Image: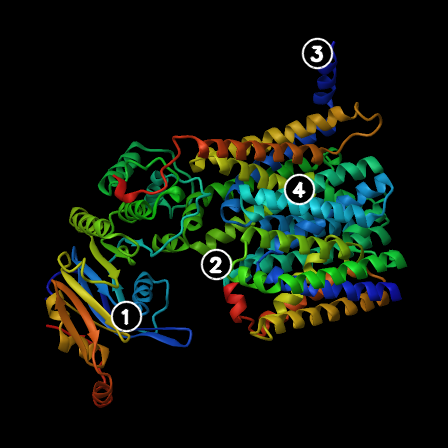
């Protein structure tokens, strides 16, 4: 499996926030143009992991290796101030050169690139409106364009499907999938519900108990694999084509955990 | 001197109570803008030949209305800034027309303990008592509203009414404090002690009591030091309040309220 | 007749040396305040902007006490206070409002002492009024080059950090993901703010410079849709209000014989009018039928 070029590689990463250990030992690799979902329940450390990858949080131990070049990032639940005089178009343009000091004269090439990006995410209709006045779904498209306009090799999205209705969810997943091919970016996208993503993803990173297991979806989402990850028995059920992970009896598995502490499981 | 001492104690009582909410609601700018914006009222009063206090109170009320109205248009800090600028511009004009002495302007801005007489003391006592009573009355809904205005609305409070009530109490307590510590420094008596109080307890009402206590100590020390050195009392109030804040920070003041507010 | 007298007045207006100095320094201050104020309002630092102005007043009174150029007094104090606020803010952003209040309190306490010493030690009784409310017509011409240099420095600094500051205002996380050095940008902005504030504190006075800093920017933000137009509009409002205020104050010598009305009064009133007009325009627009739709993604 480790044949392609790694865009992102985590090795035994541990992160402690304040006194609380959030991530204990997380390892996985992401290769070029892979579409990968980061799955975990609320509070399992998905956002912390993404922020550690971005370098916002110091890693206690272990390594985070990122391929050189830009990283695109779409944060979770960002509130854009409606008082800012920024059109959707301006936000995308800031994605291109927002980090540069100094001013720059308007250029045709830049305008064209921004326009192309707006079209790619389907944001042309509201490109002239203040970004703070747009709906949540519209803002998400603008932020996606902002993240992609520099052609990053790696795109990180934090819960992009939260707060979307079922129809928009499928639409956004399809859009992300298409864009990652079009722009050649590896995508790591966090979600608490894996079901809308299962048909689209190449790989899955399942985060629980401060540890992660990664691999193809049908290799990871299995009763014995997830039980070892959680440290107690869980059942992976398939109901009407949906996958549901249900906690089993706790006592027997705790004993098992004490005998044989599990940290990271790598699925072949 | 005795008058000054009593009046300062009354002012500290009111300022401590109100300061707790100023800190919880992050309203330091409003607490600064209201009294300073009321200062032209004193100039207007002397121009018309009435008691200074009524001028201050009148402009405080105007300030509450103006900030309340401007808040509907824009953000609170913009509302505070514009009211402050407008009121002071008016004050400059009034000063200019009334030709007041620089000395008395200074007294209004930075406090003048010697100018306090018995009638003024009675007024301060009445209004300081009123402030404390009003705080006691709205304390619980106001605290809930400071935590989350949605929670307060769900519990049956009206966010806009509570904001007006808060601004009104703030105006009342600052109007009485202006002659003592001056328009410039009233707010530091509210911000410093109350923010330090958060470091000593996690319980809201205990924090309020501690804030009042620190306020009293600050004012008493400031008066004593001003008396000894003959320097302006405002200087000591400003500096001691800052020390309170720093002391609170050093004690690691991140209690529940500090995180929420 | 009216035209002739107006011509006569304006003729005197242009040839008057203090007026020319006021126009130059005031115009510079208005321009810089509008530009720096825009980012200050967007970053919700209006209180910090006001606090810096008040605190710089302490530097102004210290300058009177020491007998040095007041601009350096204003400048030194404002830069120091801005540095303290930026330095302490790094650890805990939620404390910003309180910290600003505390710095302001300490600075004002210092101002109280220094003004008192001005009065007792140096017997400069007008210092309090000059420092706090400014006096445009008594600016010494020797200050003009220094003041314009300060203005230019603040403008260059603002232009330099324009885009990184805009991104970090939008979202700190987005900025960091893009490689913006958020701390450096914020520090440069704080210094530009200190320059702008001390310049305006000296001209319109410490406690009125808030109007010049916040007013034009807040008005422009209500109507402008893109950063560049907000910038131009804010600068325009600031300049028109300042120069208009100077002209009105000059005229006012003829309204109340022997006593002119203060310049800062006119400037502030013009700025507030501009803000109210801008708010009215914004409200009219919001009520117009071509307003942006409120809900969105699934509609198209």
Most foreground residue, C175 or B54: B54
Label pair 3/1, CB-CB below 8 angstroms:
no
Most foreground residue, C243 or A161: A161
Residue at image x 29%, y 57%?
Answer: A162
- On the picture, is A133 further left or further right than B208? left
Mark 4, secondary structure of its residue:
helix
Residue A125 x %, y %: 29, 35
Task: Identify the residue position indicated by label 3 in the image.
Answer: C3
Q: Give the Cα separation between the discs numbered 3 and 4.
A: 34 Å
Pointer 2 chain: B
Tell which tag, 1 or 4, sits nearer the viewer. 4
Tell which tag, 2 or 1, sits nearer the viewer. 2
Pointer 1 chain: A
On screen, C21 above or below C76?
above
Q: Earlier in the sequence, mark 4 or mark 2?
A: 4
- On the picture, is A219 further left or further right than C107? left
Image disc number at residue B154: 2
Image disc number at residue B85: 4
Q: Give the Cα separation between the discs numbered 4 and 2.
A: 36 Å
Label pair 4/2, CB-CB below 8 angstroms:
no
Q: Quadrant of residue A202?
A: bottom left
């Amino acid at each position: 499996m480790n044949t392609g070029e790694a865009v992102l590689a985590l090795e035994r990463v541990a992160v402690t926030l304040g006194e609380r250990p959030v991530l204990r030992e997380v390892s996985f690799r992401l290769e070029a143009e892979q579409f990968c979902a980061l799955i975990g329940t609320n509070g399992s450390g998905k956002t912390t992991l993404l922020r550690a990858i971005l370098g916002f949080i110091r890693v206690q131990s272990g390594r985070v290796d990122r391929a050189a070049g830009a990283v695109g990032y779409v944060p979770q639940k960002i509130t854009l101030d409606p008082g800012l005089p920024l059109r959707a178009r301006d936000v995308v343009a800031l994605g291109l050169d927002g980090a540069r000091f100094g001013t720059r004269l308007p250029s045709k090439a830049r305008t064209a690139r921004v326009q192309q990006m707006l079209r790619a995410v389907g944001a042309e209709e509201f490109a002239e409106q203040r970004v703070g006045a747009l709906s949540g779904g519209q803002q998400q498209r603008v932020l996606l364009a902002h993240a992609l306009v520099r052609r990053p090799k790696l795109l990180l999205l934090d819960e992009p499907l939260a707060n979307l209705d079922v129809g928009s969810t499928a639409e956004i997943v399809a859009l992300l999938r298409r864009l990652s091919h079009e722009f050649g970016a590896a995508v790591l996208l966090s979600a608490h519900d894996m079901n809308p993503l299962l048909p689209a993803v190449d790989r899955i990173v399942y985060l629980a108990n401060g540890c992660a297991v990664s691999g193809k979806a049908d290799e990871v989402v299995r009763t014995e694999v997830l039980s070892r990850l959680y440290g107690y028995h869980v059942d992976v059920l398939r109901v009407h084509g949906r996958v549901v992970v249900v906690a089993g009896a706790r006592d027997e598995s705790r004993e098992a955990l004490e005998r044989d502490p599990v940290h990271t499981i790598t699925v072949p | 001197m005795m008058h000054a001492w009593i009046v300062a104690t009354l002012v500290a009582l009111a300022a401590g109570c109100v300061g707790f909410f100023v800190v919880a609601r992050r309203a330091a700018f409003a607490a600064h803008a209201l009294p300073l914006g009321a200062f032209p009222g004193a100039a207007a009063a002397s121009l018309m030949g009435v008691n200074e206090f009524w001028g201050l109170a009148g402009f405080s009320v105007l300030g509450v209305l103006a900030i309340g109205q401007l808040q509907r248009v824009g953000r609170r800090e913009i509302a505070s800034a514009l009211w402050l600028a407008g009121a002071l511009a008016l004050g400059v004009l009034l000063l200019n027309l009334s030709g007041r002495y620089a000395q008395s302007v200074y007294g209004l801005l930075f406090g003048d303990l010697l100018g306090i007489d018995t009638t003024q003391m009675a007024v301060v006592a009445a209004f300081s008592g009123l402030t404390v009573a009003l705080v006691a009355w709205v304390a619980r809904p106001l605290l809930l509203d400071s935590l989350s205005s949605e929670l307060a609305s769900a519990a049956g409070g009206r966010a806009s009414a509570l904001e007006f009530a808060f601004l009104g109490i703030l105006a009342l307590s600052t109007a009485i404090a202006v002659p003592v510590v001056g328009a410039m420094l009233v707010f530091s008596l509210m911000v410093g002690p109350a923010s330090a109080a958060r470091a000593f307890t996690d319980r809201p009402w205990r924090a309020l009591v501690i804030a009042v206590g620190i306020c009293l100590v600050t004012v008493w020390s400031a008066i004593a030091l001003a008396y000894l050195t003959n320097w302006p009392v405002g200087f000591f109030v400003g500096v001691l309040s800052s020390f309170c804040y720093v002391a609170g920070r050093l004690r690691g003041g991140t209690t529940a309220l500090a995180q929420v507010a | 007749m009216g035209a002739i007298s107006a011509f006569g007045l304006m003729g005197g207006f242009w040839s008057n040396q203090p007026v020319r100095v006021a126009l130059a320094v005031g115009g510079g201050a208005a321009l810089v305040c509008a530009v720096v104020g825009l980012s200050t309002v967007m970053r919700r630092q209006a209180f910090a902007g006001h606090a810096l102005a008040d605190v710089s007043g302490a530097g102004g009174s210290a300058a009177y006490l020491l007998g040095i150029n007041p601009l350096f007094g204003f400048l030194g104090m404002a830069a120091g206070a801005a540095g303290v606020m930026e330095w302490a803010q790094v650890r805990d952003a939620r404390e910003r409002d309180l910290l600003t209040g505390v710095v302001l309190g300490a600075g004002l306490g210092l101002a109280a002492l220094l003004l008192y010493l001005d009065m007792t030690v140096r017997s400069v009784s007008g210092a309090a009024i000059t420092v706090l409310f400014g006096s445009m017509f008594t600016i010494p011409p020797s200050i003009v080059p220094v003041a314009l240099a300060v203005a230019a420095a603040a403008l260059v600094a603002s232009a330099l950090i324009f885009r990184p500051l805009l991104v970090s205002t939008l979202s700190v996380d987005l900025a960091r993901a893009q490689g913006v050095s958020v701390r450096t940008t914020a520090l440069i902005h704080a210094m530009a703010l200190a320059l702008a504030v001390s310049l305006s504190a000296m001209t319109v006075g410490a406690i009125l410079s808030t109007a010049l800093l916040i007013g034009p920017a807040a008005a422009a933000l209500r109507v402008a849709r893109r950063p560049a137009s907000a910038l131009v509009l804010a600068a325009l409002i600031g300049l028109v209000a300042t120069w208009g205020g100077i002209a009105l104050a000059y005229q006012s010598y003829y309204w109340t014989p022997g006593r002119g009305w203060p310049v800062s009064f006119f400037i502030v009133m013009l700025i507030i009018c501009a803000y109210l007009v801008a708010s009215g325009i914004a409200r009219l627009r919001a009520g117009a039928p071509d307003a942006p739709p409120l809900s969105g993604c699934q509609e198209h």
